[in-house]
Amino acid sequence: MKNIFEKLVSYRRYTYALSGIIVAVSIAAVVRFGLLPGIDFTGGTLMEIGCTADTTDCTLPTADAVNDALAQAHLTAASIQKTDAGTLVIRYARSTEAQNEQVMSALRAVAPGVVQKRVDFIGASVSQQLRANALKAIVISLVVITLYIAWAFRKVSFFVSSWGYGVSAIVALIHDITIVMGVFALLGHYKGVEVGVSFVAALLTVLGYSVNDTIVVYDRVRENILRLGKKKTFEEIVNQSIFETLARSVNTSMTVVVVLIAILLFGGASLFYFALALLIGVVAGTYSSIFVATALLVTFYNYRHRARHKEA
Protein backbone atom coordinates (compact mmCIF):
# COMPACT_ATOMS: atom_id res chain seq x y z
CA MET A 1 0.00 0.00 0.00
CA LYS A 2 2.86 2.38 0.85
CA ASN A 3 4.37 1.81 -2.61
CA ILE A 4 1.08 2.91 -4.20
CA PHE A 5 1.02 6.17 -2.23
CA GLU A 6 4.67 6.81 -3.04
CA LYS A 7 3.94 6.57 -6.78
CA LEU A 8 0.61 8.35 -7.07
CA VAL A 9 1.71 10.51 -10.01
CA SER A 10 2.47 7.42 -12.07
CA TYR A 11 -1.30 6.77 -12.19
CA ARG A 12 -1.99 10.19 -13.70
CA ARG A 13 -3.36 8.80 -16.97
CA TYR A 14 -6.18 7.12 -15.07
CA THR A 15 -6.88 10.17 -12.89
CA TYR A 16 -6.82 12.41 -15.98
CA ALA A 17 -9.39 10.11 -17.58
CA LEU A 18 -11.59 10.19 -14.45
CA SER A 19 -11.36 13.97 -14.21
CA GLY A 20 -12.02 14.30 -17.93
CA ILE A 21 -15.22 12.24 -17.71
CA ILE A 22 -16.54 14.14 -14.66
CA VAL A 23 -15.70 17.55 -16.15
CA ALA A 24 -17.20 16.58 -19.52
CA VAL A 25 -20.45 15.52 -17.83
CA SER A 26 -20.45 18.76 -15.80
CA ILE A 27 -19.92 20.92 -18.89
CA ALA A 28 -22.63 19.02 -20.73
CA ALA A 29 -25.05 19.63 -17.84
CA VAL A 30 -24.24 23.36 -17.76
CA VAL A 31 -24.59 23.68 -21.55
CA ARG A 32 -27.73 21.55 -21.74
CA PHE A 33 -29.62 22.83 -18.70
CA GLY A 34 -27.76 25.93 -17.57
CA LEU A 35 -27.78 27.25 -14.02
CA LEU A 36 -31.18 28.26 -12.70
CA PRO A 37 -30.72 31.92 -11.67
CA GLY A 38 -32.30 33.08 -8.44
CA ILE A 39 -33.87 36.41 -7.65
CA ASP A 40 -30.41 37.95 -7.12
CA PHE A 41 -29.70 37.51 -10.83
CA THR A 42 -33.15 37.80 -12.38
CA GLY A 43 -34.75 40.55 -10.34
CA GLY A 44 -38.00 40.15 -8.47
CA THR A 45 -39.67 40.51 -5.09
CA LEU A 46 -38.76 39.14 -1.68
CA MET A 47 -41.53 39.15 0.93
CA GLU A 48 -41.06 38.08 4.52
CA ILE A 49 -44.13 37.28 6.60
CA GLY A 50 -44.54 36.21 10.20
CA CYS A 51 -46.57 36.55 13.37
CA THR A 52 -46.56 39.50 15.75
CA ALA A 53 -44.95 39.01 19.14
CA ASP A 54 -48.27 39.29 21.01
CA THR A 55 -50.12 36.77 18.83
CA THR A 56 -50.51 33.29 20.32
CA ASP A 57 -52.83 31.59 17.82
CA CYS A 58 -51.02 32.59 14.62
CA THR A 59 -49.92 29.84 12.24
CA LEU A 60 -47.75 30.38 9.19
CA PRO A 61 -49.39 29.40 5.89
CA THR A 62 -48.35 26.21 4.14
CA ALA A 63 -46.42 26.21 0.89
CA ASP A 64 -49.61 25.27 -0.99
CA ALA A 65 -51.44 28.21 0.58
CA VAL A 66 -48.63 30.57 -0.43
CA ASN A 67 -48.68 29.28 -4.00
CA ASP A 68 -52.47 29.71 -4.14
CA ALA A 69 -52.17 33.28 -2.83
CA LEU A 70 -49.56 34.11 -5.45
CA ALA A 71 -51.63 32.48 -8.20
CA GLN A 72 -54.51 34.84 -7.37
CA ALA A 73 -52.15 37.74 -8.12
CA HIS A 74 -50.89 35.98 -11.27
CA LEU A 75 -47.49 35.34 -9.70
CA THR A 76 -45.41 32.20 -9.15
CA ALA A 77 -43.15 31.48 -6.17
CA ALA A 78 -39.48 31.07 -6.99
CA SER A 79 -38.76 29.76 -3.49
CA ILE A 80 -40.41 29.53 -0.08
CA GLN A 81 -38.16 29.22 2.95
CA LYS A 82 -38.82 29.12 6.67
CA THR A 83 -36.21 31.00 8.70
CA ASP A 84 -34.82 30.21 12.14
CA ALA A 85 -36.63 33.31 13.40
CA GLY A 86 -39.97 31.65 12.66
CA THR A 87 -40.82 33.71 9.61
CA LEU A 88 -41.49 32.76 6.00
CA VAL A 89 -39.42 34.24 3.15
CA ILE A 90 -41.15 34.14 -0.23
CA ARG A 91 -39.34 34.99 -3.46
CA TYR A 92 -41.24 35.58 -6.67
CA ALA A 93 -41.05 37.48 -9.93
CA ARG A 94 -41.33 41.23 -10.31
CA SER A 95 -44.62 42.60 -8.97
CA THR A 96 -46.54 45.79 -8.27
CA GLU A 97 -47.61 47.15 -4.91
CA ALA A 98 -51.19 46.18 -5.74
CA GLN A 99 -50.15 42.57 -6.40
CA ASN A 100 -48.24 42.46 -3.12
CA GLU A 101 -51.32 43.68 -1.26
CA GLN A 102 -53.41 41.06 -3.03
CA VAL A 103 -50.95 38.36 -1.94
CA MET A 104 -51.09 39.51 1.70
CA SER A 105 -54.90 39.61 1.67
CA ALA A 106 -55.03 36.04 0.37
CA LEU A 107 -52.50 34.91 2.99
CA ARG A 108 -54.41 36.54 5.86
CA ALA A 109 -57.55 34.75 4.69
CA VAL A 110 -55.96 31.34 5.25
CA ALA A 111 -53.61 32.34 8.10
CA PRO A 112 -55.17 35.04 10.30
CA GLY A 113 -52.66 37.04 12.33
CA VAL A 114 -49.94 36.88 9.71
CA VAL A 115 -48.20 40.21 9.12
CA GLN A 116 -45.80 41.49 6.53
CA LYS A 117 -42.30 41.91 7.98
CA ARG A 118 -40.64 43.36 4.90
CA VAL A 119 -40.79 43.55 1.12
CA ASP A 120 -37.67 44.00 -1.00
CA PHE A 121 -37.54 44.51 -4.74
CA ILE A 122 -34.47 43.74 -6.84
CA GLY A 123 -34.53 45.47 -10.20
CA ALA A 124 -33.28 43.98 -13.46
CA SER A 125 -30.44 46.51 -13.74
CA VAL A 126 -29.17 45.57 -10.26
CA SER A 127 -29.38 41.88 -11.18
CA GLN A 128 -27.35 42.44 -14.36
CA GLN A 129 -24.73 44.29 -12.35
CA LEU A 130 -24.57 41.42 -9.83
CA ARG A 131 -24.06 38.90 -12.65
CA ALA A 132 -21.32 41.01 -14.20
CA ASN A 133 -19.58 41.57 -10.87
CA ALA A 134 -19.78 37.87 -10.01
CA LEU A 135 -18.11 36.92 -13.30
CA LYS A 136 -15.45 39.62 -12.82
CA ALA A 137 -14.71 38.39 -9.30
CA ILE A 138 -14.09 34.83 -10.51
CA VAL A 139 -11.96 35.87 -13.51
CA ILE A 140 -9.88 38.35 -11.49
CA SER A 141 -9.33 35.70 -8.80
CA LEU A 142 -8.04 33.22 -11.38
CA VAL A 143 -5.70 35.78 -12.98
CA VAL A 144 -4.27 36.97 -9.64
CA ILE A 145 -3.74 33.39 -8.46
CA THR A 146 -1.84 32.56 -11.68
CA LEU A 147 0.39 35.61 -11.36
CA TYR A 148 1.10 34.97 -7.68
CA ILE A 149 2.04 31.31 -8.18
CA ALA A 150 4.22 32.14 -11.19
CA TRP A 151 6.06 34.74 -9.11
CA ALA A 152 6.35 32.57 -5.98
CA PHE A 153 7.93 29.63 -7.83
CA ARG A 154 10.25 31.59 -10.12
CA LYS A 155 13.39 30.26 -8.34
CA VAL A 156 12.64 26.57 -9.07
CA SER A 157 11.82 26.85 -12.75
CA PHE A 158 14.66 24.68 -14.07
CA PHE A 159 12.44 21.57 -14.15
CA VAL A 160 9.15 23.29 -14.95
CA SER A 161 8.77 27.00 -15.69
CA SER A 162 7.13 29.09 -12.99
CA TRP A 163 4.25 29.69 -15.39
CA GLY A 164 3.79 25.91 -15.53
CA TYR A 165 3.02 25.94 -11.82
CA GLY A 166 0.50 28.74 -12.29
CA VAL A 167 -1.22 27.16 -15.28
CA SER A 168 -1.43 23.76 -13.56
CA ALA A 169 -3.05 25.33 -10.52
CA ILE A 170 -5.58 27.22 -12.66
CA VAL A 171 -6.51 24.06 -14.58
CA ALA A 172 -7.20 22.39 -11.23
CA LEU A 173 -9.31 25.35 -10.06
CA ILE A 174 -11.35 25.34 -13.27
CA HIS A 175 -11.77 21.58 -12.77
CA ASP A 176 -13.19 22.20 -9.27
CA ILE A 177 -15.64 24.99 -10.04
CA THR A 178 -16.81 23.23 -13.21
CA ILE A 179 -17.79 20.18 -11.18
CA VAL A 180 -19.67 22.35 -8.67
CA MET A 181 -21.48 24.17 -11.47
CA GLY A 182 -22.33 20.88 -13.19
CA VAL A 183 -23.91 19.45 -10.04
CA PHE A 184 -25.98 22.61 -9.53
CA ALA A 185 -27.04 22.63 -13.17
CA LEU A 186 -28.49 19.15 -12.60
CA LEU A 187 -30.05 20.19 -9.29
CA GLY A 188 -31.57 23.24 -10.96
CA HIS A 189 -33.08 21.17 -13.76
CA TYR A 190 -34.41 18.28 -11.67
CA LYS A 191 -34.97 19.90 -8.25
CA GLY A 192 -35.50 23.57 -9.09
CA VAL A 193 -32.45 24.67 -7.07
CA GLU A 194 -31.54 28.27 -7.85
CA VAL A 195 -28.15 29.95 -7.71
CA GLY A 196 -27.56 33.45 -6.41
CA VAL A 197 -24.92 35.57 -4.75
CA SER A 198 -24.34 32.92 -2.07
CA PHE A 199 -23.46 30.42 -4.82
CA VAL A 200 -20.84 32.81 -6.21
CA ALA A 201 -19.48 33.24 -2.67
CA ALA A 202 -19.25 29.44 -2.42
CA LEU A 203 -17.33 29.25 -5.73
CA LEU A 204 -14.85 31.91 -4.58
CA THR A 205 -14.41 30.06 -1.27
CA VAL A 206 -13.74 26.83 -3.18
CA LEU A 207 -11.12 28.66 -5.27
CA GLY A 208 -9.38 29.88 -2.13
CA TYR A 209 -9.47 26.49 -0.42
CA SER A 210 -8.35 24.56 -3.48
CA VAL A 211 -5.41 26.83 -4.30
CA ASN A 212 -4.30 26.69 -0.66
CA ASP A 213 -4.30 22.89 -0.81
CA THR A 214 -2.36 22.99 -4.08
CA ILE A 215 0.27 25.41 -2.76
CA VAL A 216 0.88 23.15 0.25
CA VAL A 217 2.02 20.41 -2.16
CA TYR A 218 3.84 22.89 -4.43
CA ASP A 219 5.80 24.26 -1.47
CA ARG A 220 7.00 20.78 -0.58
CA VAL A 221 7.97 20.21 -4.22
CA ARG A 222 9.99 23.44 -4.12
CA GLU A 223 11.68 22.47 -0.85
CA ASN A 224 12.61 19.03 -2.19
CA ILE A 225 13.92 20.47 -5.47
CA LEU A 226 16.21 22.86 -3.57
CA ARG A 227 17.28 20.11 -1.15
CA LEU A 228 17.71 17.20 -3.54
CA GLY A 229 18.69 19.07 -6.69
CA LYS A 230 19.22 16.50 -9.42
CA LYS A 231 19.81 13.53 -7.13
CA LYS A 232 16.35 12.33 -8.08
CA THR A 233 14.22 12.67 -11.19
CA PHE A 234 11.52 15.31 -11.18
CA GLU A 235 8.77 12.65 -11.04
CA GLU A 236 10.42 11.06 -8.00
CA ILE A 237 10.62 14.45 -6.28
CA VAL A 238 6.95 15.14 -6.99
CA ASN A 239 5.90 11.70 -5.75
CA GLN A 240 7.92 12.17 -2.56
CA SER A 241 6.38 15.61 -2.03
CA ILE A 242 2.85 14.27 -2.42
CA PHE A 243 3.55 11.40 -0.03
CA GLU A 244 4.95 13.80 2.59
CA THR A 245 1.93 16.14 2.42
CA LEU A 246 -0.84 13.59 1.80
CA ALA A 247 -1.76 13.01 5.44
CA ARG A 248 -1.93 16.75 6.13
CA SER A 249 -4.11 17.42 3.08
CA VAL A 250 -6.53 14.59 3.82
CA ASN A 251 -6.79 15.38 7.54
CA THR A 252 -7.40 19.07 6.89
CA SER A 253 -10.04 18.28 4.28
CA MET A 254 -11.77 15.79 6.56
CA THR A 255 -12.14 18.38 9.33
CA VAL A 256 -13.74 20.78 6.84
CA VAL A 257 -15.97 18.02 5.45
CA VAL A 258 -17.22 17.11 8.94
CA VAL A 259 -18.16 20.74 9.62
CA LEU A 260 -19.93 21.07 6.27
CA ILE A 261 -21.87 17.85 6.83
CA ALA A 262 -22.98 19.22 10.20
CA ILE A 263 -24.18 22.41 8.48
CA LEU A 264 -26.02 20.32 5.88
CA LEU A 265 -27.80 18.35 8.60
CA PHE A 266 -28.49 21.09 11.14
CA GLY A 267 -27.92 24.43 9.42
CA GLY A 268 -31.40 24.81 8.00
CA ALA A 269 -32.70 25.33 4.48
CA SER A 270 -31.07 28.73 4.01
CA LEU A 271 -27.56 27.27 4.37
CA PHE A 272 -28.11 23.84 2.84
CA TYR A 273 -27.12 24.48 -0.77
CA PHE A 274 -24.34 26.89 0.17
CA ALA A 275 -22.82 24.14 2.34
CA LEU A 276 -23.42 21.57 -0.40
CA ALA A 277 -21.52 23.68 -2.94
CA LEU A 278 -18.64 24.01 -0.50
CA LEU A 279 -18.66 20.29 0.27
CA ILE A 280 -18.47 19.33 -3.41
CA GLY A 281 -15.76 21.93 -3.99
CA VAL A 282 -13.64 20.84 -1.02
CA VAL A 283 -13.73 17.18 -2.07
CA ALA A 284 -12.94 18.09 -5.69
CA GLY A 285 -10.20 20.50 -4.55
CA THR A 286 -8.48 17.91 -2.37
CA TYR A 287 -8.49 15.47 -5.28
CA SER A 288 -7.36 18.00 -7.90
CA SER A 289 -4.50 19.41 -5.84
CA ILE A 290 -2.79 16.02 -6.16
CA PHE A 291 -4.15 14.35 -9.26
CA VAL A 292 -4.56 17.41 -11.48
CA ALA A 293 -2.43 20.37 -10.37
CA THR A 294 0.62 18.42 -9.18
CA ALA A 295 0.35 15.65 -11.77
CA LEU A 296 0.32 18.26 -14.54
CA LEU A 297 3.76 19.44 -13.40
CA VAL A 298 5.17 16.04 -14.32
CA THR A 299 3.29 16.06 -17.62
CA PHE A 300 4.69 19.52 -18.47
CA TYR A 301 8.19 18.41 -17.46
CA ASN A 302 8.05 15.28 -19.64
CA TYR A 303 6.76 17.29 -22.60
CA ARG A 304 9.52 19.88 -22.16
CA HIS A 305 12.16 17.14 -21.71
CA ARG A 306 11.09 15.32 -24.90
CA ALA A 307 11.03 18.58 -26.85
CA ARG A 308 14.62 19.34 -25.81
CA HIS A 309 15.79 15.87 -26.86
CA LYS A 310 14.17 16.28 -30.28
CA GLU A 311 15.92 19.62 -30.77
CA ALA A 312 19.24 18.03 -29.81
Image: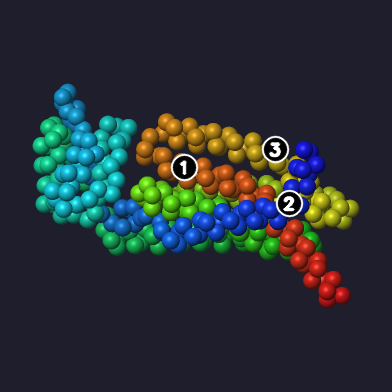
Q: Tell me where residue 213 appears, x and y as whole percent.
A: 63, 46
> Is residue 80 depicted above or below 18 in this figure?
above
Question: As rendered, which of 276 and 135 lies closer to the eye?
Answer: 276
* First in sequence: mark 2 vs mark 3: 2
* First in sequence: mark 3 vs mark 1: 3
Say which mark, if any, is on residue 175: none
Quadrant (top left/top right/bottom left/bottom right) for the C terminus: bottom right
- x 80%, y 42%: residue: 3
- x 53%, y 47%: residue: 281
| Labels 2, 1: front one | 2
Say which mark, if any, is on residue 276: 1
> Circle 2 is placed at which residue position?
11
Q: CA distance from mark 2 to mark 1?
A: 29 Å
> Is residue 178 depicted above or below 260 in this figure?
below
Question: As rendered, which of 52 and 274 lies closer to the eye?
Answer: 274
Q: Secondary structure at mark 2?
A: helix
- x 14%, y 50%: residue: 73
Q: Is residue 221 visible?
A: no
> Circle 3 is placed at which residue position?
247
Q: Tell me where residue 81 appears, x and y as whole percent.
A: 30, 40
Q: CA distance from mark 2 to mark 3?
A: 19 Å
Residue 173 in which image quadrant:
bottom right
Q: Secondary structure at mark 1?
A: helix
